[in-house]
Amino acid sequence: MIAAWQADYAGLSVAAMKNLVRTGRWHRLHLGVYATFTGEPPRDAVLWAAVLRAGPRSLLSHETAAETYGLINRPSRLVHVTIPQTQRLEPVRGLVIHRSARDPEQIRDPGLLPPRTMVEETILDLAQAAPNFDDVIALLAGACQRRLTFPVLLRQSLDARPKSRWRAEIREALADVASGVHSPLEYRYVRNVERAHGLPVGDRQAHAVQNGRAIYRDVRYRKYRVVVELDGAASHPAEKRLEDNRRDNAAAAQGLVTLRYSWSDVTKRPCQTAAEVAAALRARGWTGQLRRCGPDCQLSRS
């Protein structure tokens, strides 16, 4: 891929480029952007063409950068590029143009081509446009779980965005992700069940060996030998329910009490769920007191 503004670097004239197109050796993908081959361009050529059309300091960003990092598993329908705020660029068919007041070199991944925003910047760009905070949690937790980035790096990028949407909530969520939260349901359990009602702090994604196999328990209250498993699926196939039963039975044989909660239990009945967890903990020696999560808390006042 080559752009007309690169002609001097390539030792060609713009007229020579146009002649190569006329003779069928090259073809044009955008105004002033040419493929030096024939046939259908592959995806990486399409992305390069978008960056070249947007100008020398442009970067793939948002959904398109996320595609290149594997943050999303499908090509973005339109190609998203970010350019400096001061750059003038008319609308381009097939491109979504974003403008940034920050220096492109501050937000660009230094080692990848085509040029794109760093993975941390990409994640926070997507968070800005997310329809709800559960989607933000899924994005943060998923990226960190797959080791595409780490909470400390996301916090550093967030610090450079003083006007970022959900800034305070993201900072709090990153601390929970760092402690092992892997999903929106786990985040809601920490925030709305455990923390809001004064339960002790459990271990997240606690490693254990069961029947000779490594497993990870969503929440484990080690001192009290109580386990909480969280399942966000609306329904379970029979084989998954059987697997859960076997896992719970094996835990019971080791002296562990397992409580299993759904999305509805955590999001619609957090107070009742907290009361159940507290009862299991008290039966194992916890002497703490539940607290009301707010004026509408459904905990018994007795």
Image (cartoon, rainbow, N blue to C red):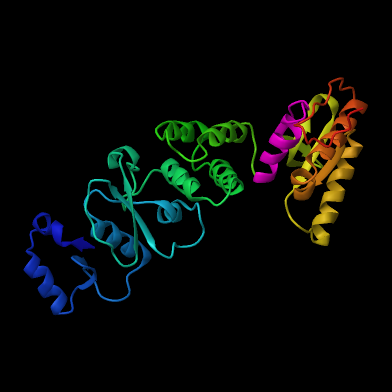
Q: Is residue 137 above or below residue 64?
A: above
- Across and down, in percent, residue 166 comes to 52, 39
Q: Quadrant of residue 43?
A: bottom left
**Residue occupying the point 43% across, 44% down:** 119
Q: Quadrant of residue 273?
A: top right
Q: Quadrant of residue 107?
A: top left
Q: Is residue 205 visible?
A: no
| Horizontal relation, residue 116 to residue 295: left or right | left
**Residue occupying the point 8% across, 56% down:** 8
Q: Is residue 286 above or below residue 50?
A: above
- Across and down, in percent, residue 215 comes to 74, 41
Q: Is residue 20 above or below residue 77?
A: below
**Residue occupying the point 31% across, 67% down:** 93
Name the quadrant of the C terminus.
Answer: top right
**Residue occupying the point 66% across, 39% down:** 187
Q: Is residue 186 visible?
A: yes
Name the quadrant of the N terminus.
Answer: bottom left
Q: Find out whether residue 56 is within the magenta segment.
A: no
Segment tinted magenta in the rendering: 184-205
Decide which of 70, 120 is in the foreground and name it: 120
| Horizontal relation, residue 7 to residue 257: left or right | left
